[in-house]
Amino acid sequence: MAKRILLTGGCGYIGSHICLELIEQGYQPVVLDNLSNSSTTPLQRIEQLTGQHIPFIEGDVRDEAILDHIFSTYELSATIHLAGLKSVAESVAAPIAYYQTNFGGTVALCQAMQRHRVKHFIYSSSATVYGLTAQSPIREDAPTAPASPYGQSKLMAEIALRDIAHADPQWKIAILRYFNPVGAHACGQIGEDPCGVPNNLMPYVSQVAAGKQPKIRIFGNDYPTPDGTGMRDYLHVCDLAHAHLCALRWLDGASGAKVFNLGTGRGYSVLEIIRAYEKACGHALPFQFLPRRDGDIASYHAEPALATRELRWSATRTIEDMCRDAWNWQSRNPNGYT
Ligand code: NAD
Ligand code: UFG
């Protein structure tokens, strides 16, 4: 029988790609999402693509009764936990919501799993836990120093997970620190659908390419990088989704909690992204240089060797693939899922 996996946040950008990958690899995802930053449309599209029904529960990851209902209804073998809030700026303005949802939600979920003796767990963490001073390539043992309540809340959840695994050796936990996920599934049916004006580079570039924003704002051209613009380790969301499948397999032979970086191991500048996107969409993209964005750092990228060695995962898709698939999604869905 196919293994059932609880996927929290499965209606979101990354969660929907993991959901599709799980089904393609023979697993049965059960999705819990409160739809605070998504809708059920991605699940409907995945059902159409795969011909499989996806059990969906609308609810909050902190809701004990809902969690008990899920764990007693479905025979689950593991949880992949993505449900959470992810805006750095919003977390500065509303820290309580971030600690409650990201930290409190993770603890509540683990409590429910403990009650129902499901102890395999994959956690969506972020490179943001490293803070501003880490030297690239960043290894997993680099010091952590998150610069926002968002980053703090992700790190606090990591710490709780390590303590949980330490206290009970039956827990097996993969903590995955994502670098910069971008792009969309090549089918063009699921992708990133940000609310309002996008904060992140790739969805903003997509909207300029589609004529929905007038020009790309490049935050800083005086960084100590080859072309002066900020550099990041962008990775294709399908490579990221696949890493969760590798982590699920790794959990079977694992012990304790372990942190893995998920990135390609190389950085691209804002100008390099714009050039690659121009090739993908077939026309020039207007941009202007603006001052640096508060709190940004010049450049960082992952050291992904641990994931390659232990998870047997590495990113295979190029920056051209990322831009092509982002444009394919944007041009087929000019208004996102609506
Ligand atoms: P997203 O907002 O698209 O998806 C998150 C999903 O969680 C949404 O569907 C939302 O409705 C749901 N959700 C939020 N609060 C909830 C709650 N209390 N109970 C149940 N569901 C809830 O975000 P995403 O980009 O897919 O990110 C998923 C995860 O990956 C997050 O935990 C985020 O911190 C982490 N992450 C994202 C990035 C990135 O650049 N996108 C980078 C590093 C880490
Ligand atoms: N940038 C622009 N113009 C924009 C948006 C971004 O020039 O309109 C630049 C930024 O200054 C930076 C680069 O593009 O140099 C990437 O910026 P993003 O906002 O796309 O990504 P960040 O690296 O700043 O942050 C993202 C998430 C964080 C997460 C981090 C690591 O927003 O929450 O990746 O996973 F922690």
Image (cartoon, grey):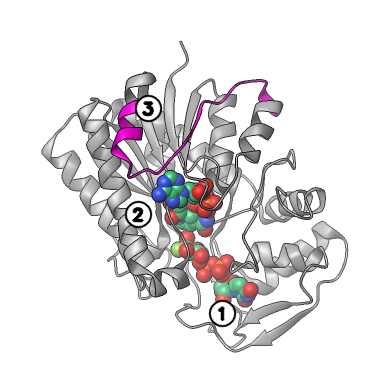
How many C-alpha atoms fall within 10 Å of the one at disc 2: few (<14), some, or many (≥20)?
Answer: many
Q: Label 2's element?
A: helix
The yes-or-no answer for disc 3 within 8 Å of ligand 1 is no
Residue 7 % position (x, y): 45, 35
Q: Estimate the spatial distance between the alpha carbons at disc 3 and disc 1, rounded to whole Å.
A: 49 Å
Q: Which of the two labelled residues, at mark 3 and mark 1, occupies the earlier sequence position?
A: 3
Label 3 Cα neighbours within 10 Å, binned few <14 / some 14-19 / many ≥20: some
Q: Is residue 304 visible?
A: no
| Residue at the left extreme, as displayed | 167
Q: Earlier in the sequence, mark 1 or mark 2?
A: 2
Q: Is residue 38 above or below residue 50?
A: below
The reply, left or right, for residue 161 in relation to residue 278 is left
Check residue 70 in the rendering and tell me which mark sits there, or answer none. Answer: 3
Q: Does 275 sit left or right of 197 as displayed? A: right
Disc 3 to disc 2, C-alpha distance: 20 Å
Q: Residue at position x 39%, y 74% from top?
A: 92
Does the residue tagged 2 have its C-beta within 8 Å of any atom of ligand 1? yes
* Residue beneath disc 2: 102
| Above or below for 23 versus 7 | above
Q: Horizontal and vertical percent for residue 249? A: 40, 28
Question: Circles 3 and 2: CB distance less than 8 Å?
Answer: no
Mark 1 residue type: Thr
Front position in the image: 154 or 144: 154
**Mark 3 or 2, nearer chain start:** 3
Badge 1 element: loop
- Magenta residues? 49-69
At label 1, counting other C-alpha atoms closer than 10 Å, the crowd grade (few under 14, some 14-19, many 20 or more) is: few
